[in-house]
Image (tube, rainbow, N blue to C red):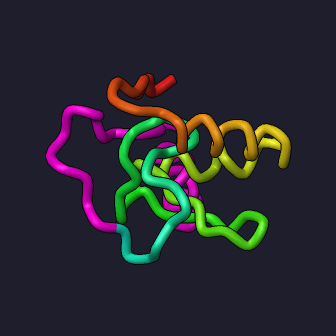
Amino acid sequence: MRNLFFATVLAALAAGCTASSTDAAPEATAQATVNDHCPIMGGDVTSKGGTAEWNGKTIGFCCPGCAPKWEALSDEQKAEKLAAADSAEGDHDHDHS
């Protein structure tokens, strides 16, 4: 039973985002984040996307698959991605690869 649980969790993480940038209006996040757009996929931050703490800041994501990708980045890469997400407007690349 335990192996089934872990297999399900790993499959969900491997699947990545399931939300589309053309989905309904962005949801309010349960916790204030420093970003409105996901630093990984560029989509709107959602409450379902989750958050991560980094350098004393709460970073928001568009979907649960983005948080593990964020954690795998170096601090320099995180800073670059967050800056790019903050400056992005309009059309966002929401590629799930």
In the current view of this chain or complex, which residue is farthest to the left? 24
Q: How many labels, in total?
A: 0
- Residue at horizontal 40%, vertical 53%? 45
In this view, the residue in front, 87 or 36, is 87
Q: Position of residue 32 (x, y in %)?
A: 46, 73
- Residue at horizontal 57%, vertical 42%? 39
In this view, the residue in front, 93 or 9, is 93
Q: Which residues are magenta?
A: 1-28
- Residue at horizontal 26%, vertical 60%? 27
Q: Is residue 1 above or below residue 38?
A: below
In this view, the residue in front, 70 or 5, is 70
Q: Is residue 5 magenta?
A: yes
Q: Is residue 87 above or below residue 62?
A: above
Q: Is residue 45 above or below residue 94?
A: below
In this view, the residue in front, 30 or 87, is 87
Q: Is residue 2 magenta?
A: yes
Q: Quadrant of residue 17?
A: top left
Q: Position of residue 9 (x, y in %)?
A: 51, 55
Q: Is residue 76 left or right of residue 38?
A: right
Q: Quadrant of residue 95?
A: top left
- Residue at horizontal 36%, vertical 68%? 29
Q: Position of residue 42 (x, y in %)?
A: 46, 36
Q: Position of residue 54 (x, y in %)?
A: 73, 64
Q: Quadrant of residue 80?
A: top right
Q: Is residue 47 left or right of residue 38?
A: left
Q: Is residue 92 left or right of residue 33?
A: left
